[in-house]
Image (cartoon, coloured by chain):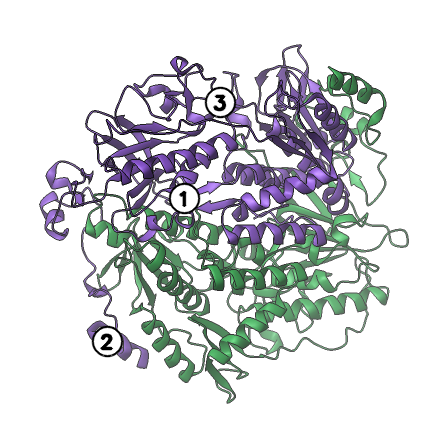
Chain colours: A purple, B green
């Protein structure tokens, strides 16, 4: 009874944060059903650059006022490029608005390790708010969980709609809004290539997002358990436990290595009833790790074979729910199919009415500007140097994206400090140094405490290339110090330690 | 080129684990399409107690042979009761076969903490193979990811079908099989009660499994981000960020406490644009924590109100997608609805043709046997003392389940050692001590480093009851030492430490 009295007291005084009586909660709940006039009445007074509401015919963030407001930098995407940029942008100069369908950056080089439980999923996801804290609390800075649907360089606005997956039983209608920008950075990355092969999107799993890794893990553990069930025919068991990886680039090789590590050190012990049935096959049309030094390629091949990965040279022609058809007619039954054959321009990139580089990426000049329009920049896998620059299109690597993000942050800070931050104010500024990419080397792990480090600056150049335990150690350390926050560095170290001591976690949650 | 040579070499010699040539992988892949004769030919020779195959008209594990094989203990369920039992069962005496739709135990008292990122999901999930390692590698012990569909005490068999959620784009047909048992332990738990209220199953989220906690977390973070989007009307914002908890038992109170902790220490800092809009309401028809001492109830009420939780006394009449209707007509709009109004017998329990206890649970005698049939036992939330025993039905608590699991493991070990392990061999054995439950006290946390510990043995008895920081400390320590494996104890401690230092994780993965 006494708590009921407390409730009564509560409704009078004890919560001061917001005067809100639960007994009077009987208002119309859907946004669309609320008449605009009512909404406008409830909303705070509208100022320029603040929320504009439905009643004004424009939903979103309006243009900023030079002199009264900071210029607004809009960043599309939360990959390596966008996040590195946001990390270094001077928030005293700009308000930062980030639009992305995910609120975190994925530390992609370690993603393969999460599929088999070597690392936790959360250890490789870095929330944007931790990378650039201003986005969480600075008055004019925001993160919007949304997809950009179009860019209008003339009016300096982007159109967006919210992402509502996981909103529950009744999916929410996406909410549409516009954001005016002073500077726009497109860092939306690329899309996994399927080469138009039928069935890839439906049946294969990519390895680019945390939810992909989660899906791979769930399916792998499910198949391990299903194959143990009484009466499952031998052939079906063999199919369920056949893990096929298509694409012999670093992602495919690293995932194959992790998988065979998992099989050798964990499946053999914890699923010992079915250990004879599990196999990994890596299918590649050309050579594996084709960008690496020949000695490293040989080493990788030897290591993979040693740990039980079957290497098959072949071209996939068709993907069916339970088997792949190669172009020579070979049928490869699979229980798990991971697709990592590289990336290409996304549908959104293709749809943009902007000049393109060779290969269909957004074309940029040496300062990473989109030259035909004002105040628009592009970085990362979605951009490429225009043919007119005479520069080659850079490879789709985290390293390139990260370097471009860092460069552009400094360029934008410099522009902002020179008074060119607001829309169309940077026309006559001297931009200084061009962006020059210097390749620092490539790394890939092949499982079992072995890795490759290729320190040559290009495929043709000479330079150091090492393989084995030492490079595995370099690889781990290099990654550990590149994980952005201390929290995640700590977690990755703890994960590695516990995997080493207790083995990988196998709970299917 | 060289790796191609290696592949060629590989197909001749290097992998010796299984002679399997990828080029010859062109067999029929679906189980049903394989003719039975073919399957039987491929399978190893059939012995009693080993895999029986389709061609024999019985798919599953056949009866064991006394003298040649250990008796088979079949455990249905991986909750507190089943897992505690498996932990202590002597695997020199029994082969253990566990059938459950999840391969891990959920450490339920800490589940509420995972919804807001205080703990990681994996820290509260303990794989069955870690609880009873024999299940992973002993020749006659198995874990089957499956649901039991019926029990036949006369033939000493259970019918099961595999669980295949998460199997990918094309859902697998469940595979049906039978398992013969010598001793059967039903530990399938209970089901969340909805009291037949319309819309609960569709729109509310329970808090009993890890995937429930994941769903709550995803929805909470989605709503936090959606409400920050330009132009969302005030009322919609307020609705999205209104978290409603129905049920004032320990789960509801603990979740409300965790949620308000999250709001105060994390939302205020990391979602500061929307902090004025987020609220927690706890709806309960009677008193909160009704099993606790009155002083503790008062304390809990005060603490919850202090941390901003609104307590509403009311009965829910109807649940719509975006609002709840109470029986007095009050409409409560919500963005997140968590339902924790206790548990009742599951559909499977109701379907069993076995005697029932008051309340519809499986009726057991003082030795936890189902008395009308042989070799069947029931423990945990799914069982209750038969009226004829004169004992009250015990509350649905982890504590009860755990104690019953431990008791039954020792009883079964004793039976097995006395030669009564095999089916129908335990009729004339002296079972020794009856199961007696002694309540050690109840605990609940109310957030902000405060908890309640009620050490009275029953609601009417006198005894120690303490509240505040000291009991929070006791609560944490008690749970930490009850987490089963060292790995998870370590992870829970690390999670608490990092949450304390860095705050809760907010990446939505």
The chain carrying label 1 is A
* In this picture, residue A185 sits left or right of residue B393: left
Gap between marks 3 and 2 measured at Cα: 66 Å
Q: Which residue is mark 3?
A: A394
Check if mark 3's residue and mark 2's residue have beta carbons within 8 Å.
no
Task: Decide if residue B58 is in sight here.
Answer: no
Please identify the quarter of the rendering in which residue A305 is found.
top right
Q: Position of residue A160 (x, y in %)?
A: 28, 34
Could you classify mark 3 by the number of other residues whose Cα lies within 10 Å: few (under 14), some (14-19), or many (20 or more)? some
Q: Position of residue B173 (x, y in %)?
A: 58, 34
Which element is circle 1 on? helix
Q: Which residue is mark 1?
A: A87
Q: Position of residue B488 (x, y in %)?
A: 62, 59
Please identify the quarter of the rendering in which residue A366 is found.
top left
Gap between marks 1 and 3 measured at Cα: 22 Å
The chain carrying label 3 is A
Residue at x 57%, y 61% (from the top left corner): B494
Could you classify mark 1 by the number of other residues whose Cα lies within 10 Å: few (under 14), some (14-19), or many (20 or more)? many
Residue at x 43%, y 39% (from the top left corner): A84
Task: Decide if residue A395 is in sight here.
Answer: yes
Question: Does label 2 lie on the same chain as label 3?
Answer: yes
Task: Give above or below for B258 relative to A403.
Answer: below
Residue A8's disc number: 2
* In this picture, residue B351 sits left or right of residue A353: right
**Mark closer to the observer (1, 2):** 1
Nearer to us in this view, A15 or B131:
A15
Q: Earlier in the sequence, mark 1 or mark 3?
A: 1
The chain carrying label 2 is A
Which element is circle 2 on? helix
Q: Position of residue B448 (x, y in %)?
A: 42, 71
* In this picture, residue A464 sits left or right of residue B477: right
């Amino acid at each position: 009874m006494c708590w009921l009295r407390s409730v009564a007291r509560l409704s009078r005084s004890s919560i001061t944060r917001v005067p809100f009586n639960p007994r009077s909660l009987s208002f119309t709940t859907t946004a669309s059903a609320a008449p605009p006039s009512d909404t406008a009445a409830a909303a705070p007074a509208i100022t320029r650059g603040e929320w504009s509401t439905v009643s004004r015919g424009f939903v979103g963030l309006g243009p900023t006022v030079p002199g009264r407001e900071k210029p607004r930098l809009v960043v599309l995407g939360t990959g390596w490029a966008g996040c590195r940029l946001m990390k270094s942008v001077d928030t005293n100069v700009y308000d930062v608005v980030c639009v992305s369908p995910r609120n975190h950056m994925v530390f992609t080089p370690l993603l393969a390790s999460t599929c088999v439980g070597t690392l936790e999923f959360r250890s490789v996801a870095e929330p944007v708010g931790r990378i650039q804290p201003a986005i969480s609390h600075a008055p004019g800075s925001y993160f919007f969980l949304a997809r950009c649907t179009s860019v209008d360089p003339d009016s300096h606005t982007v159109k967006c709609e919210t992402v509502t997956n996981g909103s529950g039983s009744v999916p929410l209608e996406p909410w549409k809004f516009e954001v005016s920008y002073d500077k726009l950075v497109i860092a939306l990355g690329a899309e996994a290539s399927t080469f138009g092969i039928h069935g890839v999107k439906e049946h294969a799993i990519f390895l680019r997002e945390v939810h992909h890794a989660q899906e791979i893990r769930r399916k792998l553990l499910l198949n391990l358990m299903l194959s143990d069930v009484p009466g499952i025919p031998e052939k079906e068991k063999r199919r369920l436990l056949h893990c096929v990886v298509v694409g012999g680039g670093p992602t495919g090789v690293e995932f194959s290595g992790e998988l065979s590590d998992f099989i050798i050190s964990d499946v053999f012990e914890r699923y010992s009833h079915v250990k004879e049935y599990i196999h990994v096959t890596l299918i590649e049309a050309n050579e594996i790790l084709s960008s690496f030094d020949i000695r490293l390629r040989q080493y990788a091949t030897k290591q993979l074979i040693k740990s039980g990965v079957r290497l098959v040279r072949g071209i996939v022609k068709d993907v069916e729910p339970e088997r792949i058809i190669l172009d020579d007619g070979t049928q490869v039954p699979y229980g798990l199919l991971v697709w990592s054959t590289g990336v290409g321009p996304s549908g959104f990139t293709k749809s943009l009415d902007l000049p393109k580089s060779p290969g269909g990426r957004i074309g940029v000049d040496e300062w990473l500007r989109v030259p035909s329009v004002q105040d628009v920049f592009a970085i990362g896998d979605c951009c490429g140097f225009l043919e007119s620059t005479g520069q080659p299109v850079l490879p789709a690597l985290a390293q390139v994206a990260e370097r471009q993000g860092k460069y552009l942050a400094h360029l934008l800070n410099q522009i902002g400090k020179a008074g060119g931050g607001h829309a169309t104010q940077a026309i006559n500024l001297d931009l200084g140094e061009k962006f020059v990419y210097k390749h620092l080397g490539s790394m890939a792990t092949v499982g079992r405490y072995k890795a490759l480090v290729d320190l040559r600056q290009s495929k043709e150049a000479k330079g150091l290339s090492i393989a084995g335990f030492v490079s595995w150690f370099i690889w781990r350390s290099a990654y550990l110090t590149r994980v952005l926050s201390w929290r995640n560095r700590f977690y990755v170290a703890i994960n590695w330690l516990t995997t080493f001591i207790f083995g990988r976690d196998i709970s299917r949650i």
